[in-house]
Image (cartoon, rainbow, N blue to C red):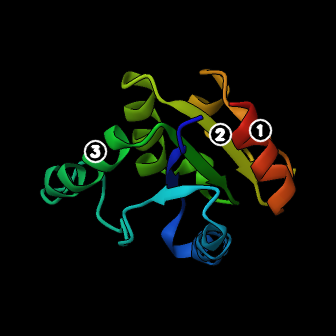
Amino acid sequence: MAKKIIFISFDYDNDAAYKNLLLAWDKNKEFDFELYNGSLKEAINSTNAPYIKSKIKPLILKASHLLCIVGKQSASSAWINWEIQTAVEAKKKLIGVKIEKAHLSPSPLISNGATWALSFNFDAIKKAVESS
């Protein structure tokens, strides 16, 4: 089976530690993670947004999956919603990983049949990746 290339969508300001944990787990070479490792403090309709999108979109298109780390602010992030929608339009498989079960999920994950890991641990995430 081909190695899965996974774009990580996350809230840079609040959930970077979880992204870093995924990258540490990546050392086992079971996954191949891709990400835009920059802050998206710019508004999605700002003058810099087209440039930022031009950097992120090729990474999403290269991936086979988009994994969204669902933290406290994820559901309200226009950038995360754009990343998910871009993945949906490119027919990428979606994976949602909840940091805490109570966190609201971005609506494009729910409405587009994401596979879920309802806790942030290696086994749950690996199972979600393998079943997607």
Mark 2 vs mark 3, CA separation in Å: 17 Å
Q: Compute the Cα span from label 1 to label 2.
A: 6 Å
> Mark 1 — residue?
116
User: In the figure, 129 relative to 40: above or below?
Assistant: above
In the rendered structure, find residue 57 and report the number of the disc placed on it. Answer: 3
Q: Measured along the vertical axis of the image, is residue 1 above or below residue 56?
A: above
Q: Position of residue 91 (x, y in %)?
A: 44, 22
Circle 1: element type: strand
How far is the residue under mark 3 from the one under mark 1? Answer: 23 Å
Is the residue 4 above or below the residue 72 in the image?
A: above
> Extreme front residue here?
1
Image point (59%, 55%), residue name: 31
- Mark 1: few/some/many CA within 10 Å (<14, 14-19, 20+): many
Task: Please tell me in which quadrant of the rendered image residue 127 appears.
Answer: top right
Disc 3 secondary structure class = helix
Q: Amino acid at mark 3?
A: Lys
* Mark 1 or mark 2: whose residue is earlier in sequence: 2
For the C terminus, the quadrant is top right
Q: Is residue 69 above or below residue 110?
A: below
Query: Position of 114 compared to 118: left or right?
Result: left
Identity of the amino acid at label 2?
Answer: Ile
Q: Nearer the viewer, residue 46 or 54?
A: 54
Q: Earlier in the sequence, mark 3 or mark 1?
A: 3
> Mark 1–mark 2 contact, CB under 8 Å?
yes
Residue 126 appears in the figure: yes
Is 85 situated left or right of 110 in this image?
left
- How many residues crowd around disc 3 within 10 Å: few (fewer than 14), some, or many (20 or more)? some
Q: Name the residue beneath numbered marker 2.
A: 95
Q: Is residue 105 visible?
A: no
Measured from the top left, where is residue 96 in percent x and y?
Answer: 68, 43
